[in-house]
Amino acid sequence: LVLRAQGAAFGDAGAAAFAAGIRECGALRELEFDAEGTAVRDGCGAALVEAAARCPELRRLQISVAGTDIGNDFCSAMANGFRDNARLEAFAFDATNTKVGDEGGQAMARLIESAFELRSFAANLSCSKVGSETAIALAGALEGHNHVESFTLRASRTALADDGVAALFAAAASGRRRGVAP
């Protein structure tokens, strides 16, 4: 199921309607939600994620909320919604130029820790409010996860510093020792 509403006059009401439709798709395996540059905010975005989390067959989730007012609450809803989701294999999240900060980054780390079959994780947090705390939390989640084969973090123009980068490299080295590609 794909919804691309980039720059459209799409907001909370549209996201709520889309969320209601997702709840009816019990066999949904892939979901792409692209609301870049729309008026979607934390509360309704969270409702959409929670609806997707109720799809027991969902394997791939791609969300773009770049240039919106989405923040930490949305990320927390993702982590809570997909807690102990044994089937989620691929997760991609574009939150470029949003209000997502380290609290949201730590929530994404919880998502990695609890998605038992996660193989691919990609997040673009450029121009957001994240820093080294996010990178350190993500690195910790990676070190404890046995299945992640692909990990991408884009964090241009953020407060990411040397300590966060060092933590990510240490996690990648740890993954290589377990046979996981960085």
Image (cartoon, helix red, strand yellow):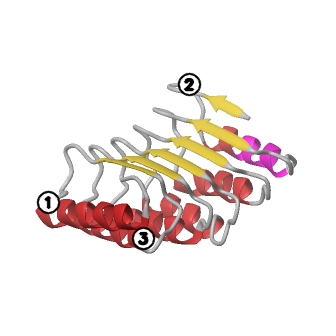
Label 3, residues with CA under 10 Å away: few <14, some 14-19, many ≥20: some
Numbered badge on residue 161: 1
Image x and y of residue 63, in percent? 55, 43
Query: Which numbered disc flags the more N-terminal residue, 3 or 2?
Result: 2
The residue drawn where x is 48% and y is 69% is 145
Left or right of residue 140: residue 70 = right
Query: Which numbered disc flags the more N-terminal residue, 1 or 2?
Result: 2
Left or right of residue 22: residue 108 = left
Element under disc 2: loop
Mark 1 or mark 3, whichever is nearer to me: 3
The residue drawn where x is 18% and y is 64% is 166
Mark 1 or mark 2, whichever is nearer to me: 1
For the record, the magenta segment spans 16-23
Mark 3 or mark 2, whichever is nearer to me: 3
The residue drawn where x is 55% and y is 50% is 91
Say which residue label 3 marks.
Answer: 141
Element under disc 3: helix
The residue nearer to you, when weighing 130 against 178, is 178
Element under disc 1: loop
Toward the left, the furthest residue is 162
Left or right of residue 168: residue 123 = right
Q: Indicate whether 98 appears above or below 169.
A: above
The residue drawn where x is 43% and y is 61% is 179
Image x and y of residue 149, in percent? 47, 53
Asked whether the beta carbons under mark 3 and mark 2 sit within 8 Å of each other, the answer is: no
The residue nearer to you, when weighing 48 against 168, is 168
Identify residue type, mark 3.
Answer: Ala
